[in-house]
Image (spheres, helix red, strand yellow):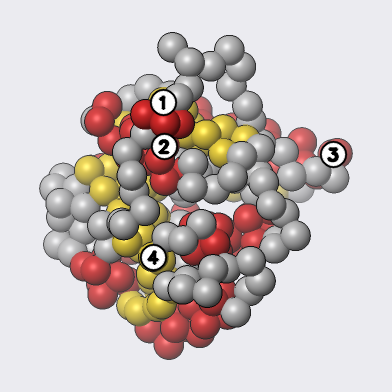
Amino acid sequence: MAFDVSALPDVSGLTVGIIGGTGDQGRGLAYRLARAGQRVLIGSRSAARAVQAAEEIGALPGLPDDAAVSGGDNVEVSSRSDVVIIAVPWDGHRDTIAALREPLAGKVVIDCVNPLGFDKQGPYPLRVEEGSAVQQAAALLPESRVCSAFNHVSAPLLADPRVDRIDLDVLICTEERELVGLVAALVARIPGMRGIYAGRLRNAHQVEAFTANLIAINKRYKAHAGIRVTDI
């Protein structure tokens, strides 16, 4: 089946919250989505830091005149958002998500966290008791609609205003097939990107782990590598 952007739902009216929005990945995703006209909320444990990050993102070039980027603490952002992206460091993943179970109930939650370790030999995937970061999130958020996406997107590319297109595919893992269209539509708001269904949550561990390979590729070739799925 060919990939058909025209078949994707309209998500332009959704509010997207980013937990961990003051970090590199979170800020980059916030910038790209705001640049596409999406309403974005930056979340942090510190509301003041989130507000500052939102102001900095809102001042970047390329955003529409009516760009809506604001900040707040994690609970406020989770409560006010339709879709919430989890972009926190792995070592704070469990505690951050556990504290947001109530405000995230009924929400679409996209986890883009990669459990990686680093040593003298480079990056390597960490063992996760639940199987993967997104499976940990799903276990902690039984009343949310959880999926993984955006695991392989380069933070420097996202944050660079000179980059107009980011040509890569975003792999989506979820137990709910109907979530794929919504998330793919959100992905497609960023020029050059496609959201591709990559299986159930049990397949997410290898998607998360592959980020270690991409980091190694980037270091070796001084690049910002992503992935493309062929024949779709």
Where disc 4 sits, the SS reads strand
Between disc 1 and disc 4, whose residue precedes? 4
From the top left corner, tell me how far across and down residue 82 is, in percent: 26, 57
Q: Is residue 29 above or below residue 137?
A: below
Classify 10 Å Cα crowding around label 3: few (below 14), some (14-19), many (20 and above).
few
Disc 1 to disc 2, C-alpha distance: 8 Å
Q: Is residue 192 above or below residue 196?
A: below
Q: Which residue is mark 3?
A: 220
**Residue drawn 48% across and 22% down?**
3
Q: Which residue is mark 1?
A: 197
Q: Residue 215's quadrant in the figure?
A: top right
**Residue drawn 63% across and 27% down?**
228
The kind of residue tagged 1 is: Tyr
Between disc 2 and disc 3, whose residue precedes? 2
Q: Residue furthest bottom?
A: 48
Camera-nearest label, 3 or 4? 4
The kind of residue tagged 3 is: Arg
